[in-house]
């Protein structure tokens, strides 16, 4: 509890007066003093000054009563806490990458010194100086909110400056309108990628990319497939792949199979087209049922027991080199084969509900937009053909 001493009023050389209150609080050692200036030494002026000084003292004490910590130290504590929660490795990696950048940007700045204005400026710089997308900046904002929620929970902050943050998002309307056709490959583009893999004698990439296109799997799902996850139904003679895990990168250990999928709807069993079955037969020759189906023939990690799993970084690098050498304007990642699968099924006239079930999307805006974009083109062709209907 704060103990206040008798206020003191001292005349100043400029004709005004200095109104001071000394006080003691158990949260720190010694006697402290807070002051303000008044123009007249009247009872009314002294009453107003007392209110002002005591409010200032309370504000100061509220800051000093929290445990002082720098943002980088708090982020380390938050990351440890997230890991203890048992979150998926991929989720932890995603959180950590953004939190590490925030830690580097704010360095050893005291958490208690951060205010809403500084956060507004930071997010604005991410948007317009670093040229990040609206979606990326929203992720940064959510991580900042997570930092202050943790700080409040464990006594490192008294208030959350993120609550009044206002982000001046970019106008990305034109970007969104022109983007849908860049989400998938045309037949010609698809064959260009496949032929490039074969020209480079990278049958491993050829099989993986073709599988992604034929099945619509996420790259982590396909690279995590074990040979035993693919089988033929003895009654129907149809082939199926069971998707029950995903491959994630763990620092110091390389690629590890996570024994669950991205979402509950991602855990699924899908029918395989004949071309995918041929890929399976080729890749599983003389192999153990517990091996990965897809292997990087030039890379392996000392911790891996399942024959050289692919890593997302090596796949991304291979595609980046392909784009650069072919001077493509369309930037592609492994995810584009999944989107191309969606576009082809839409062209074939399969309903959206069946497509979302197949690719393991309970609710995907991207899948829906690709579907509507493709079917809209099909409807336009139909409308044109109707002109000659008699």
Image (cartoon, rainbow, N blue to C red):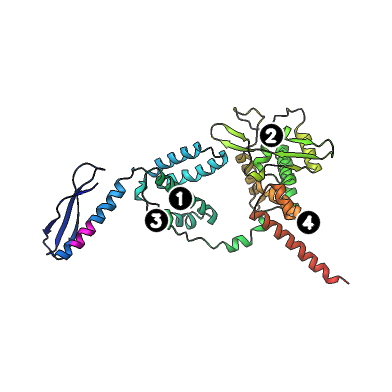
Q: Quadrant of residue 219?
A: top right
Residue 341 rendering spot, x and y as whole percentages: 73, 50
The residue identified by callout 2 is 295
Magenta region includes residue 374: no
Would you place residue 143 above or below residue 176 in this image? above
Q: Quadrant of the C terminus?
A: bottom right
Label 4 with label 2: CB-CB less than 8 Å: no
Callout 2: few (<14), some (14-19), or many (20+) C-alpha neighbours within 10 Å?
many
Distance between mark 3 and mark 2 Cα atoms: 49 Å
Nearer the camera: disc 3 or disc 2: 3
Q: Which residue is mark 3?
A: 116
In the rendered image, residue 96, in percent from the top left (x then y), is placed at: 50, 42
Determine the residue positioned at 70% across, 60% down.
373
Q: Which residues lie in the magenta part?
A: 47-53
| Alpha-carbon span between mark 4 and mark 2 | 34 Å
SS label for mark 1: helix
């Amino acid at each position: 509890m704060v103990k206040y001493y008798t206020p003191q009023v001292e005349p100043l050389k400029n004709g005004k007066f200095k109104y001071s209150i000394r006080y003691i609080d158990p949260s720190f050692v010694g006697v402290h003093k807070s002051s303000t200036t008044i123009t007249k030494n009247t009872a009314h002026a002294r009453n107003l000054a007392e209110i002002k000084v005591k409010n200032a003292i309370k504000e100061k004490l509220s800051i000093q009563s929290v445990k002082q910590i720098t943002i980088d130290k708090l982020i380390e504590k938050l990351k440890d806490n997230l890991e203890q929660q048992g979150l998926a490795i991929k989720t932890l990696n995603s959180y950590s990458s953004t939190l590490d950048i925030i830690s580097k940007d704010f360095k050893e700045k005291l958490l208690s010194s951060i205010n809403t204005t500084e956060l507004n400026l930071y997010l604005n710089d991410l948007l317009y100086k670093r040229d990040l997308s609206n979606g990326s900046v929203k992720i940064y904002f959510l991580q900042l909110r997570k930092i202050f929620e943790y700080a409040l929970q464990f006594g490192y902050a008294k208030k959350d400056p993120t609550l009044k943050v206002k982000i001046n998002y970019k106008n990305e309307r034109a970007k969104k309108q022109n983007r849908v056709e860049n989400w998938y490959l045309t037949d010609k583009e698809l064959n260009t990628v496949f032929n490039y893999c074969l020209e480079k004698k990278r049958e491993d990439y050829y099989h993986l990319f073709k599988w992604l296109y034929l099945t619509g799997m996420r790259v982590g799902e396909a690279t995590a497939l074990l040979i035993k996850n693919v089988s033929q139904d003895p009654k129907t003679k149809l082939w199926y792949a069971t998707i029950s895990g995903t491959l994630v990168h763990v620092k110091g250990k390389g690629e590890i199979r996570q024994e669950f999928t991205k979402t509950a709807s991602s855990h699924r069993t899908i029918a395989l087209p004949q071309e995918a079955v041929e890929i399976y037969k080729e890749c599983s020759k003389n192999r153990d049922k517990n091996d990965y189906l897809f292997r990087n023939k030039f890379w392996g990690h000392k911790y891996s027991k399942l024959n050289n799993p692919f890593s997302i970084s090596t796949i991304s690098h291979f595609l980046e080199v392909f784009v650069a050498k072919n001077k493509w304007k369309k930037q592609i990642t492994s995810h584009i084969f999944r989107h191309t699968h969606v576009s082809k099924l839409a062209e074939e006239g399969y309903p959206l509900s069946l497509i979302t079930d197949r690719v393991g999307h309970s609710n995907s805006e991207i899948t829906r937009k690709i579907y509507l974009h493709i079917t809209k083109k099909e409807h336009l062709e139909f409308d044109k053909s109707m002109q000659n209907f008699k």
